[in-house]
Every structure is written in structure tokens, then in C-alpha cells.
Image: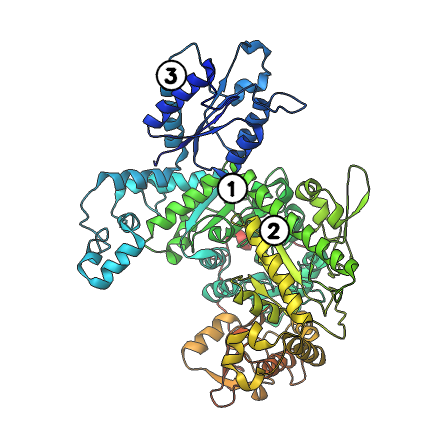
Amino acid sequence: MAEGTVLMAVTEKPDAGGATAGQLARVAEGLRAAGLQVRWVVSVSDAEAVLRTEAGLAAAVVAWDLLPGAEDGPGGAAVLRRIGRRFQNLPVFLVMADEGLRELPLWVSQSVVGYVWPLEDTPAFIAGRISTAARGYQDALLPPFFKALRRFDDAHEYSWHTPAHSGGVAFLKSPVGRAFHDYFGERLLRSDLSISVEELGSLFEHTGPIGEAERNAARVFGSDRTYFVLHGDSTCNRLVGHFSVTRDEIALVDRNCHKSVLHGLVVSGARPVYLVPTRNGYGLAGPLPPGEIAADAVAARIAGNPLTADAVSPRAQYAVFTNSTYDGLSYDAPSAARAFAASTPRLHFDEAWFAYARFHPLYARRYGMSVDEEAFPGPGRPTVFATQSTHKLLAALSQGAMVHVRSAPRAPVEHDRFNEALMMHGTTSPLYPMIASLDVATAMMDGPQGHWLMDEAVSEAVRFRQEMVRIGRRIEAAGDRPPWFFGVWQPDEVTDPASGARLPFDEAPADLLRTEPSCWHLAPEADWHGFPGLTDGYCMLDPIKVTVTCPGLSATGAMSDWGVPARVLTAYLTTRGIVVEKTDSYTTLVLFSMGITKGKWGTLLDALMDFKDLHDGGAPLDRVLPALVAEHPQRYAGRSLRDLCQEMHDHLRDARLVELLDLAFQQLPEPVAPPRLCYERLIRGGTERIRLADAPGRVAAAMVTVTPPGIPVLMPGESTGEEDGPLLRYLRALESFDRHFPGFGSETHGVTRAPDTGDYMIECLLPDEQDTPPGRRDAGPAEQGPEHQDDGMNPP
């Protein structure tokens, strides 16, 4: 490994002139000679600053009597506790003066690897002990696959296998190749290896260091078995869906799902029965309410779906739902699992944005792998899958993902069978740096460091949330400017469970918000969240997913006479180098991942303040959004930022766009044909692309997903409905918005625009094709294994 750093937190500076300081200074010289850097501090605050910012520590030397001490003990005790919260197995040497070991608390011996009396041994000997411990720590620090990959790289073997660039050598033979080589560096290219390298193991056989890395990930993430997947959570979803349900079987699907879930249904040939999440006035998708996943409600959904009449079995074999949602809403996982268990033996938590949940107590019981034998005992527990985009909010390379499995006797997951599905969706040419990044992302979350990393992210999110409220209050109290500011979607008040006191959100202790889950629960019928039908503790808002709200609309759907649409705000933030995660009509989502700093969120605050000043001052658009005006001069030249905001707000209000969105998502289209049939017709010329004006009464052949909000509004095989029905009214409203406000249009997957008019066009089955019966296979007794038999969990 590269040279590490040793923290020396002692009572005197190296040039203090005392015998102890001089001896420790010579120890530091010995450490530097051994290739280690030394950070010398003489106070608890400086030591804590180093521990907070220096992740490359290899050892620490701490004086027990470090000053200033805290009320509950010497300064050295405070530093040892901080080390224990930040690092796992960091070698710590305690510098002693005249005191004996018997005066030390018992916990100290568990926190250190040795003691140093500076004047009793030679500096070279002490430095040798420290450097040996540091090297041992650094070697043990590396997780299995990353360690093996480094060892292989150090061997400098000749490559006689794929890939053909042979460790980057081929790139050096071309000018453009040389530019590529110089940009990415030799080390990355040397680690791009073939599956022929046996000593690194096999991704499909799960052997060697790769298999060891997956088993380590299973331990860290709390699963029975974990599989590395190299094409993102999308492939994970297709894989789990393909394994869990087969042709003409019933799958329960959260309508707030990623399009990859549908792709899994197309591949498997399953019959989807969609479950409808609640929505609020902002247009944000909430959770599936308890009433929607109760056994009797699910049975009614299945019975009322035309596609289930000729399914293999009337019972669902699989259910998939999003946890947490894009906007940060997570379920009480064991409670949700109990509700689903009456309807299906397999439950899939799509946790693309929630891989970190296990590593902070705030999220206890909120993630799929928490549904274990202790949380849900007895034979009714379903098999649980959790699919995670490790790269999204943990530190892995893009496309790095994992599938976690907790098998149950009702629907056991045999590794060899699951591995067959994995091999169908995986690649035989894996990118080894991506595998290494999954291995490292796992190791980063192992032990106290995982909690420390997540706690820092939660803390920064809490600080930002509270500061937003305080700024709004200060603006309102100042009286020298229009009394509006952006808000944050969160409770107005929280309760301290220790005292029962109700506290305004911005006045609540940060430690309370950082550690108490009930502060983030969506209380039933609370106006701040706007979701109906919830029960106490059922759903929680994730503090690190921060939704900034704009004036003009409330969570209950009330619109004011004026407003600031979020699309205009996002366009301005982009000019400031601030790229948000998602923008809806009046909300903008920002993610407080592990990489967020005070500097980043402070810059966002400043940009929000500047936008308000520009808006209130009537700043011209060509100064605020010059690229927009340059691209569409006839539409926007001569307008002010305030004019644009008001015009867009008036259009959204008059078109009732948010209301139409809610209707389109709550009143699901009628299912006519299974997705698999639509895909077959799409490939074989049984479809056509038509304008919305010609769409009433047709059957969609491809998914239509509008971003925002990024949720499918029309699935393959569903009827488009009547001309004045909710679906077509919503799509026409979007089409009208795009025409009125060029440069602010929605990203709508499954919609193309007519080259002559810009009209929306969608793919539908040909009229003679949409009347073709969907057909089904015959399932003989030999096919109907245990998963098709009554497992005693049929709803009454």
C-alpha cells in the first residue's frame, strides 16, 4: 500500500525541549524513515480534526493525559473513543507517564494494542513496534478481491489472453490510444483482465477471491447470500424477476417501479397485477398504503384483473416494491413483509437507492435484509430479495450492484438454480475494477466506519434542513423584502420521546434529529406529507434525501396565486454548477450522500438566496438564463425571471397538470394483454406509432414513463382509455406544456415527437393485434412444483 499516516496526539510539541518530547520526536523521525507520515497534535480538538479528515491513518500514538481533558476523564480517553467510532482495528499505542496500568479503566485495554513509556525504550525500538503494527493493519485493511487484484498486478505477468489491449500496451501503438492510456493510467488498464486469470476467482462459479468477496458482502449486508452484479440495479431487478416468476404466473408489482421491473416481466412472461401507491399534492409518489397490501385487497386486485383469468394459478408467486422510494420513503420492513406474506411466498425489495440502510440505527427495520427469523419468525416468512445499486449512494463504480438473498422454507432459493438465472443476465467479460469497487464499498461499511460515514451524511443533511427553515424565518422577520423562501419537505415539529416535548424542527437538537427515527415518521394524515391512508410508524422519511419545495403548491395540493416552478429553479442552479437529482413541478430533490460537505450545501444555500434576489428584483432572463434565451430568443427575449415564473405557474394551474398527474396514477388503465405479447408484437411489426389524437381506445405496446416523476404512467398491454380519460388528458397537458415552454420539457420515455408538429406519439398495437387473445401455456402436473401448491398462506 501507499505510505500511511501515524497520528501522534501528545502533550508537548516536538521542539518543547523536555526529555519526553525529545524522545517522541526521535520516534517520529524513525516512523518517517520507515515511510510513514506523522501528524503531530497537542490537543483533543486537533486530534479529533485529524481523525475526522484523515482516512489514511495507519496507527495512532495517544497520550493518556492529553489536554484539555473532558469532565468525564482525561483527553486521551476522548481521543480513544473517537478512534473507536471512526476506525476498525486501528493500532493504538497509549503513551504513559508515571501512572500504572491499574489506574486505567478496563475498556482502555480493549482499545489499544500496546503502551509506550517514552524514556524506557529506545526511539528506534518504539518506532519499529509502531511501524510493524501499521504495516500489519494496512495489509489486513484490504478486502479479499481487491487484495488479490493488487497482488496479481504486482506480479507483472505477461498477458496472452483477452482483452486485446494487453494491459494497455495496444493503446500505446496509436496516437488516440496513447491519449486514452495517458488519461486513465496504466494501473486501471493493467487491472482490466480476462476470466482466464484463475487466481482471481470466477464471478459465475463464485470461487477464489471473488467468491470470498461475495461472502464477505453477505456478512456485512446481513444476507444469507450476496451476488455481485455488474450492470446496475436494472439487471438485478430483471434477474430476480426472471428467477421468481415464470410464464403466465401472477406477479404483484408496485406501480411506483423502475422500468427494469417491467423488463423482468417481459422476459419471464408473467402476468402483472399492479398495486397503487398513495400520492400527495406535490405529485410525489408515496408508499403502498397498508390497505393496498392487505390480503383481502390483494385478492380483490387479482380477481378484478382480466389478465389473471387464465393464469397458471390464482395465487401470486412474487411481489416487488420500491424501498426506499426515489423521494426517500421507506417501510417498516417486517410489517410490510407480514402483510405481503399472506399473498405471495417471494418478496423483492427494490432498494436501488437504499444500500446504506443497514449501517445507521436510524434505519433499523427499514430494509429488506432486516426481515430475518427474529423479526418475522415462523413458517409464514417469505423469501426476501433486496436489489441494490451499490454505486448510487455507496462508494462503488457506476453499474456496480448487488443482489442480497434471505431464503425461507416456503420458497427456498437453491444457489445452483439462482446461478443459472444470474448467468443468463450477467457477462463472461466482467470489468475487474468494478468488482474491486464492490469489494471496497463493502469493506468501507464494515464495522464502526460504516456507521461513522452514514452518521456524517445524516448530520450534514440535518444541518442543511434546519438552516433552510431558519433562513426562511429570518427573511419573514426582517420585513425588508418579499417574505418568501424555499422550503424543505419535512415535519414542522418533532417530539422528543424522552420528555414528550413538541419542538419546532429548526429548534430541535441536531442529535435528536440524527438519532431518533420517530422524528422522521409520517404521522397519519399529517398535512406536511399529504399522504392518506398511513398508519403510525409504517413509513419514514429518509433525512439524507432532501426535497426542496418551491412556492406555489402545498403537500395537500393547494395552489396559490403566484409561484416559482421548480423547473426554472433547476435551470438556474445548473448555471451555478449545481446539478440536482430530480425535479418535479414544485419540488427539487438533492441527495446528501457520503460525498456531501458543508462547502457543497453552503453553496446550494447561497444559490437559493441569489435566485430569490434575482426573482424579486425582476432580473432579465438573458442575464439569469442566457443559454435558454439564446436558444429560444423569440420565446424568451425581453422577459424577466419573475415573468417566466408567473407565466409557467399560471399555465400549470390552469392546465391542472399536477392534479391530472394524480388522476393518471391513481386510476390505472385497464389491462388488455400481457407485456410479453406486446413485446413480441413490437419486434414482429404488430405495432404502429400514433399521435395522441388517434390514441383513444388503443392498447399500448411500449411503456410510457414521464420524468418527472419517473414512474410509468402507461404499461405495455394497457388501454389508453377514452379521449377525456385521465391518461390522455395528462399526456396532452404535458404536450401542451412542452409547446409553451421550450427548454423546460419533460423527459418522457416511450414518447417520440412528430418531426413536423412536435406532437406526442406513442407505440400501440395494431387494431387487429389488440383483439388477439393473449393465450396461455398449459401447466401440467409435472410443472406444478411446491411453489404452485397451497402453502397454508391463502387469504380467506
Q: Earlier in the sequence, mark 3 or mark 2?
A: 3
Residue under numbered circle 2 = 544
Q: CA distance from mark 3 to mark 2?
A: 47 Å
Kindly identify the amino acid type of the residue bearing the numbered disc 2: Ile
Mark 2 or 1: the one toward you: 2
Judging depth in this view, the residue of 41 and 347 nearest the camera is 41
| Left or right of 4 on screen, residue 789 | right
Task: Report x, y in % for residue 400.
Answer: 43, 52
Q: Residue at x 55, y 61 (%)?
A: 581
**Crowding at mark 2 (Cα within 10 Å: few <14, some 14-19, many 20+):** many
Q: CA distance from mark 1 to mark 3?
A: 43 Å
| Left or right of 118 on screen, residue 691 | right
**Crowding at mark 1 (Cα within 10 Å: few <14, some 14-19, many 20+):** many
Residue under numbered circle 3 = 123
Q: Which mark is residue 566?
A: none
Mark 3 secondary-structure assignment: helix
- Residue 313 at least partly seen: no
| Left or right of 226 on screen, residue 76 | right
Mark 3 or 2: the one toward you: 3
Residue under numbered circle 1 = 221
Mark 1 secondary-structure assignment: helix
Judging depth in this view, the residue of 141 and 575 nearest the camera is 575
> Where is 576 relative to 397, above or below?
below
Kindly identify the amino acid type of the residue bearing the numbered disc 1: Phe
